[in-house]
């Protein structure tokens, strides 16, 4: 059993045209947090994982080998996957439950823990930043890629919290119920070691209805941005993650 536990931080959805994606999701009843021309947009909930929409520039393809050299081969493979991914659910991002370890400057302490899981390798930690959707200031975060590529991305929290709180969506969505991904038997055992013996919210594709993820309280099925989002079932309260 690892002495550092992880939880799902957010789901990353790759889109080619972020302005159109934001417009489509707002039409479907989501309150989308987006600064015009920013490559990222966010759908927040009061509890549990949030959703991040992101787009990449084609020139990012040319620096993927450099990322592999600087931070480790899995990081280069991750960047390449982001560039080549079609619209849709692209990554599940996990974060240390311990707030101190979730700080951008402390994430490197988690590498030994993930590499203690048989068959898992972590990269060096990459420090990054983005513009805040609140006031445009730079906010810091860090992340670490894992091998096998199918495993979640390990990330820190933002150094300045960005969730505005009191999140309300006209379509009734209140939080992530489950997310489905394809894993081999070995990868599923590795994910289980990262998230716990019964990973809340994470399910293997094929064991659920044909959807990418489900949202508690959502009043209709949503098909847009390359994802199918199902209404959550049998959920009266948001589960703690």
Image (cartoon, rainbow, N blue to C red):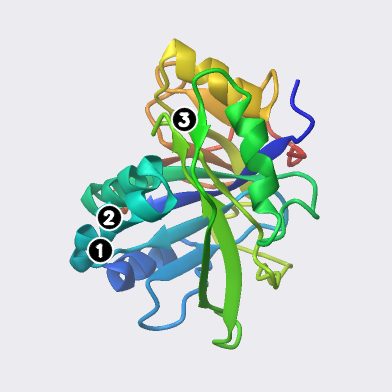
Q: Nearer the viewer, mark 2 or mark 3?
A: 2
Q: Position of residue 177 (x, y in %)?
A: 61, 37
The residue located at (30%, 57%) in the rendering is: 66
Counting the numbered discs, the total is: 3
Q: Residue furthest top?
A: 185
Distance Cα–Cα, label 2 vs label 1: 7 Å
Distance Cα–Cα, label 3 vs label 1: 28 Å
Mark 2 lies on a secondary structure that is: helix
Is residue 214 visible in the rendered structure shown here? yes
The residue located at (35%, 55%) in the rendering is: 67
Residue 64, numbered circle: 2
Q: Going by the image, does 104 lie left or right of 88? A: right
Q: Nearer the viewer, mark 2 or mark 1?
A: 2
Residue 145, numbered circle: none
- How many residues crowd around disc 3 within 10 Å: few (fewer than 14), some, or many (20 or more)? many
Which residue has dot 1 on it?
Answer: 60
Quick one: label 2 or label 3, which is nearer the N terminus? Answer: 2
Quick one: label 3 or label 1, which is nearer the N terminus? Answer: 1
Please say if 94 is above or below 53. above
Q: Position of residue 192 (x, y in %)?
A: 61, 21
Which residue has dot 3 on it?
Answer: 180
Please say if 22 is above or below 103. below
Q: Nearer the viewer, mark 3 or mark 1?
A: 1
Q: Quadrant of the N terminus?
A: top right
Q: Residue 158, located in which quarter of the rendered image?
A: bottom right
């Amino acid at each position: 059993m690892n002495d550092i536990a992880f939880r799902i931080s957010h789901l990353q959805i790759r889109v080619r045209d972020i302005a159109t994606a934001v417009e489509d999701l707002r039409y479907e009843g989501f309150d989308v947090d987006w600064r015009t021309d920013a490559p990222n947009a966010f759908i927040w909930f009061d509890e549990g994982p949030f959703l991040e929409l992101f787009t990449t520039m084609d020139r990012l393809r040319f620096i993927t080998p450099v990322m592999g050299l600087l931070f480790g081969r899995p990081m280069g493979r991750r960047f390449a996957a982001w560039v080549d991914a079609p619209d849709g659910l692209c990554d599940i991002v996990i974060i240390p439950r311990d707030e101190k370890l979730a700080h951008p400057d402390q994430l490197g302490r988690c590498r030994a823990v993930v590499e203690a899981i048989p068959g898992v390798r972590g990269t060096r930690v990459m420090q990054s930043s983005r513009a805040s959707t609140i006031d445009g200031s730079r906010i810091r975060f860090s992340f670490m890629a894992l091998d096998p590529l199918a495993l979640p991305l390990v990330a820190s929290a933002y150094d300045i919290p960005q969730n505005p709180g009191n999140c309300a969506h006209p379509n009734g969505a209140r939080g992530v119920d489950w997310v489905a991904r394809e894993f081999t038997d070995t990868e599923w055992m590795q994910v289980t070691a990262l998230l716990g013996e019964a990973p809340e919210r994470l399910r293997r594709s094929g064991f659920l209805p044909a959807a990418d993820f489900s949202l508690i309280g959502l009043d209709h099925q949503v098909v847009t941005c390359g994802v199918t989002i199902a209404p959550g079932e049998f959920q009266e309260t948001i589960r703690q993650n």
